[in-house]
Structure formats: structure tokens, C-alpha cells
Image: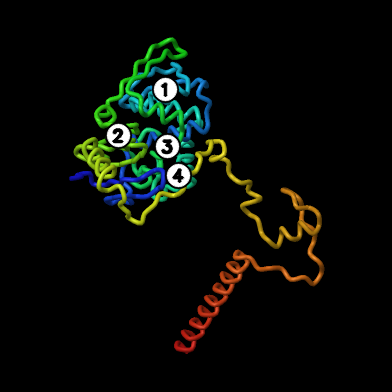
Amino acid sequence: MVRARYAILVDPQTGAVLWGRRSRTPVPPASLTKMLTALAVRASLDLDAVTVASKTAAAQPARRLAMKRGQKLTVGQALKALMIVSANDVAVMLAEAAGGSVARFARAMDAESARLGLRASSWRNPHGLDARGHRSTAFDLAILARAVLQDPWLARVVRKRHAAFISPSGRRHTLTARSRFLLGYRGAVGVKTGFTDDAGHCLAAAATRGGRTLIAVVLHSPDNAADAGRMLDWGFGRGRSAQTGLRLPGPVRPSSLAALLTRPPRAVERHHPAASEALASAGLARVGATPAARPAGSRTAWTWRDRQRVATGAGAVVALLAALTLAVHRFRQRA
């Protein structure tokens, strides 16, 4: 029996949802957040680029690498620490390197969510520590797990049990995965564990058997590895042909933060069709050009603001007339 409060089992190749329990309910996702962080960083930074720990990064709770201010990692090393030992200090290092700040990175995470088809997720940080408004669903997290497995480099990282490297600062780091699912389930290939007080124990689990891969996501579970194992066993066996009618959206390649954080110019946001046609006819259809004067006798299309101004003025006139009528009435009563 699956005891997780929220869960989903999907076939990433077809996108079919085989089974779910409250899979569309937004809840805290804990460190499963780091799947999106990794995808955004992979699309934005070169693996050989060097990141530097800031004071903010070094002050994060659960500092798996115990980074100190000024210490360095390559992006590739940082991503390994992010996904294998769930390092919160490294999550902030990567967010600041890719987005300039945690706040900007969080805005990019929301934008990336919209692109990938995550309809019920909102993000406030790159590591998944509990924060107001930081939410996702089992359905959305399954989309992220599939995207991680579709990135060949990340797919190799999330199935590693051990990794070691020497940082640009000269420190040797040894990483050891603690996921009971990854260490104990036959055919396990990842993906990410998580825990916070609000989220409980969470897991995005993937396994391959007989050439077929399945993804199970469990949130707020008393035993995430056991729950994921039961779901996968059922999916590889009796649930092989199960159909719920639900399907993940088609895969979308993650975009760089530079593209995600670029906003359209204000001139485009204030575009009016009538003005655009006038510019085009005058040969001046470019940003900042001055539109040609309208021909005499031509009619101007009313905008919403024009109508609002007229309605406001009319309301003021009506109020004034009502006040005058009341004053005259009271004067006659006194007379």
C-alpha cells in the first residue's frame, strides 16, 4: 500500500500517467526543487565555468560542502554536489552565478516552469527550503524528472553513488549518495530525494527494467523509498498497461536564464494596431519612430483609456446635477 499523501507514476517515453493520488495538489517540494535548478543552470552555464561562494551561499543551512566565502567550484562540480548530496550552499552559488541573485533566479524558475508545462508550481529559491509560496505538484515534478533524464550529462550524474573531485580552490571533495532508493532498488537510475519539515520525505524515483523506464514521484511520505518501490513494481508488472487518461505535456528543451529574464521592450508592450498601421504606411515602422499625422477628417479609434476618461467625466456631471437638484429642493422646502 502506498502511504504518500501525493504521488504519481508515469511512463516518460509516452508521457502516460499510470497512477496518481492528488497529483495536481500544490505542496512544498523540498529538494526536488533542485531538479529545476539543475536544468536552468545546464542551459545557462558552461560546465567548466568557475563559481565563487558568496557570504549568502556560505550561510545556508545544511551546507553539504561547507563552502566558505570566496571558495570556488566549477559548474560541473557544483551540479554534482547539488544532485548527489543535495548541497544547499551550492544551490545558492549556482543561482547567483547563473542569475546574478537568488531573486532573479527564482523569477527565471517561474518562467521556465511555464515553458516546460508546469501549471501549478511557483518557486522562491533554488534549494527547496520551506518558503511561503514555494509550491509544486507531483505531476509537475514528474515533468522535471523526465527532463533531467533527457539531459545525458545530468542523467549520468543522478545515478552516481559516489563522486570525487578537487576544486579550483584546491580542496578535495568526496560525494556519497544517501538515497535508500538509489542504493537499494533494482534498476534504479535516480533522480532526487528531499526533506523539510513542511514537505516531509519526498522522492522523484526512476528505474529501468527490460528496456522500459518509469518515474515515480512521492511527496510527504512516511517511507518514500518503499512507496516509490511499490509503485514501480506495480508499473513494471500488473500496471504495465494502466490508463488514467492523463498525460504529461510534450518535452521542451530548457531555456537559458539570459533568454528567460529578457523582457520585451516597452514600445512593444504599448503597441496599438492603429498606430502600427500608420507607421507602416509612412515607411517608419521601427522602434522610436514618430508616426505620420492623420489625414484631415479621419476618425480616431477610441482606446480603453479614452472611454474611461469619458465615463469618469460623465459620472462627475451626473453627480453635480444631482447635488444641484437636492440643493434646490431643500431651498424650496425652507421657503
Q: Secondary structure at mark 4?
A: helix
Q: Residues within 10 Å of mark 2 (few under 14, many from 20)?
A: many
Q: Picture coordinates of residue 170 (x, y %)? A: 43, 10
Look at the numbered discs 4 and 2 and tell me whether their residues touch, using CB distance below 8 Å: no
Residue that numbered label 1 is attached to: 55
Q: Position of residue 129 (x, y in %)?
A: 33, 35
Instruction: Name the secondary structure under disc 2.
Output: strand
From the image, state whether disc 1 or disc 4 is nearer to you.
4
Q: Position of residue 303 (x, y in %)?
A: 63, 65
Mark nearer the N terminus (3 vs 4)? 3
Residue neighbourhood size for the residue with mark 1, other residues' Cα within 10 Å, grouped as few (<14), some (14–19), many (≥20)? some
Name the amino acid type tagged 4.
Answer: Ser
Kind of residue indicated by mark 3: Leu
Residue 186 to residue 270: above or below: above
In this figure, which residue is indicated by the disc labeled 4?
113
Identify which amino acid the numbered label 1 is placed on: Lys
| C-alpha separation, residue under disc 1 versus residue under disc 4 | 28 Å
The residue that label 3 is drawn on is: 36
Residue 195 relative to residue 258: left or right: left
Residue located beneath label 2 in the image:
194
Q: Alpha carbon of mark 2 to alpha carbon of mark 1: how far? A: 24 Å
SS class, disc 1: helix
Q: Whole-percent x and y of residue 60?
A: 35, 26
Q: Is residue 272 visible?
A: yes
Q: Which one is in front, 285 or 36?
A: 36
